[in-house]
């Protein structure tokens, strides 16, 4: 599973993070390394969708936070993925 939107939202589900921290977190939990262009493109789309928001920071790194709408969207996507996983596992047992 390498949908960058779901990966970024999943990373932010356990707390605020700046871009580099998200990249490292995603590499750890998903085994996927997003490049900066991919990551910041996704961040821009997620902000425009209202699913994440930037936080004020005195640092040059800007942290982001998952919004309630983003949390709902992530839950919906994870539910869909879970259904696919269950079907796939059930079908593999019948082979």
Image (cartoon, rainbow, N blue to C red):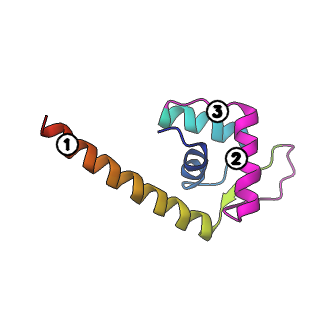
Relative to 92, 39 lies left or right = right
Depth check, front residue: 27 or 49: 49
Identified at 48% across, 37% down, the residue is: 29
Q: Which of the two labelled residues, at mark 3 and mark 1, occupies the earlier sequence position?
A: 3
Where in the figure is residue 42, as x and y percent of width and height?
A: 70, 46
In the picture of the structure, the residue carrying the numbered disc 3 is 34
- Give the extent of the magenta segment: 31-60
**Dot 2 alpha-carbon crowd within 10 angstroms: few under 14, some 14 to 19, many 20 or more:** some
Circles 2, 3 touching at the beta carbon (< 8 Å): yes
Identified at 66% across, 62% down, the residue is: 51
Which circle, 2 or 1, is nearer the viewer?
1
Where in the figure is residue 88, as x and y percent of width and height?
A: 27, 43
Q: Is residue 19 above or below residue 12?
A: above
Q: Which mark is residue 42?
A: 2
Q: Which of the two labelled residues, at mark 2 and mark 3, occupies the earlier sequence position?
A: 3
> Does residue 18 show up?
no
């Amino acid at each position: 599973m390498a949908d960058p939107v779901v990966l970024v939202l999943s990373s932010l589900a356990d707390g605020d993070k700046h871009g580099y921290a998200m990249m490292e977190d995603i590499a750890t939990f998903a085994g996927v390394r997003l490049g900066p262009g991919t990551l910041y493109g996704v961040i821009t789309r997620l902000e425009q969708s209202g699913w994440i928001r930037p936080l004020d920071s005195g640092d040059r790194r800007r942290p982001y936070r998952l919004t309630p709408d983003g949390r709902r969207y992530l839950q919906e996507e994870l539910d869909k993925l879970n259904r696919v996983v269950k079907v796939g596992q059930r079908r593999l047992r019948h082979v």
